Image (spheres, rainbow, N blue to C red):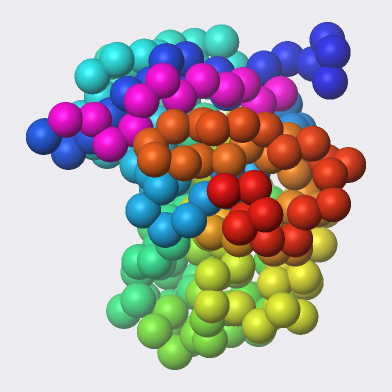
Amino acid sequence: MSGTATALRVTGLAAGYGRGDVVKDITFAVPRGGSLLLVGHNGAGKTTIFRAIMGLCAVSAGSVEVTGASLDRRSPAERARDGLSYVMQEHGTFRGMTVQENLEVIIGLSGKLSRAQRSEAFTRVYDWFPRIHERRDSPARALSGGENRMLAISLGLIRKPAVMLLDEPTLGLAPATAESMVEVVRRIQEETGVALVITESSLTAVRALATETKVVRRGGLSHTIDDRTDITSLDEIL
């Protein structure tokens, strides 16, 4: 990836929830079109890293940059406008609204768009996720687990972010559904150049997306797993 512009740079990040830091000394960079997988057991600090990057918890040290611009004094809403997208593990959709209404709410946050721009945005996500197009008039609460993940990812992508944070995107999905999701995300990345940071609690099919894999342990990044290393379980390295 030499010579490739950096989409996300995190340096010396420390953050928590009021009684000391949960994560500390978090440093990494992801190039445009790159994918970083953060893998670790539940409670290791993966979600807190994401919340700190998004400005959703107290940060005591460090910095966050997206495409070279500092986000350190920016609110979560401002960070989203600056090109950062966060797809949460759960509660990533408006469950009482239809699929179409969910997308309309998020695209509406992009400011004044022309009819053609709005149409292009909807066409793009429906092309990536045809099943979501089929269910566009259904409320989010009526969707299956896999469909809800598709919708949540669509909401994260519709504003064309530079960086997307995906928190355990395959959690609770059947293996075949998870593999299908990975292939769609791979296609999206190839077409858009979005940089991805993905968390998982195990070495799942998502690892195939990663250009780099780091282990999160006790609130820090313990080491990097070489992509050529044949590891199928975290227990082999922790």
**Going 16% across and 30% down the picture, which residue do you hit?**
20
Side of 173 relative to 83 (left or right): right
Tag count: 0
Side of 225 relative to 201 (left or right): right
Q: Residue furthest bottom?
A: 142
Tell me where residue 214 sits by quadrant: top right
Tell me where residue 190 sits by quadrant: top right
Q: Residue furthest left?
A: 19
**Residue 164: x %, y % from top left:** 56, 41
**Going 35% across and 76% down the picture, which residue do you hit?**
95
Q: Quadrant of the N terminus?
A: top right
Tell me where residue 68 sits by quadrant: top right
Q: Is residue 135 above or below residue 228?
A: below
Q: Is residue 185 above or below residue 135?
A: above
**Going 58% across and 84% down the picture, which residue do you hit?**
135
Tell which of 10 and 157 is nearer to you.
10
Tell which of 30 and 77 is nearer to you.
30
**Residue 44: x %, y % from top left:** 41, 47
Say whether residue 170 is visible. yes
Q: Which residues are magenta?
A: 20-31
**Residue 181: x %, y % from top left:** 72, 67
Specify whether residue 67 is painted magenta.
no
**Majority SS type along the magenta span:** strand
Tell which of 31 and 152 is nearer to you.
31
**Residue 177: x %, y % from top left:** 71, 78
Side of 112 relative to 30 (left or right): left
**Going 42% across and 15% down the picture, which residue do you hit?**
12
Q: Is residue 171 above or below residue 85?
A: below
Say whether residue 153 is visible. no
Specify whether residue 23 is painted magenta.
yes
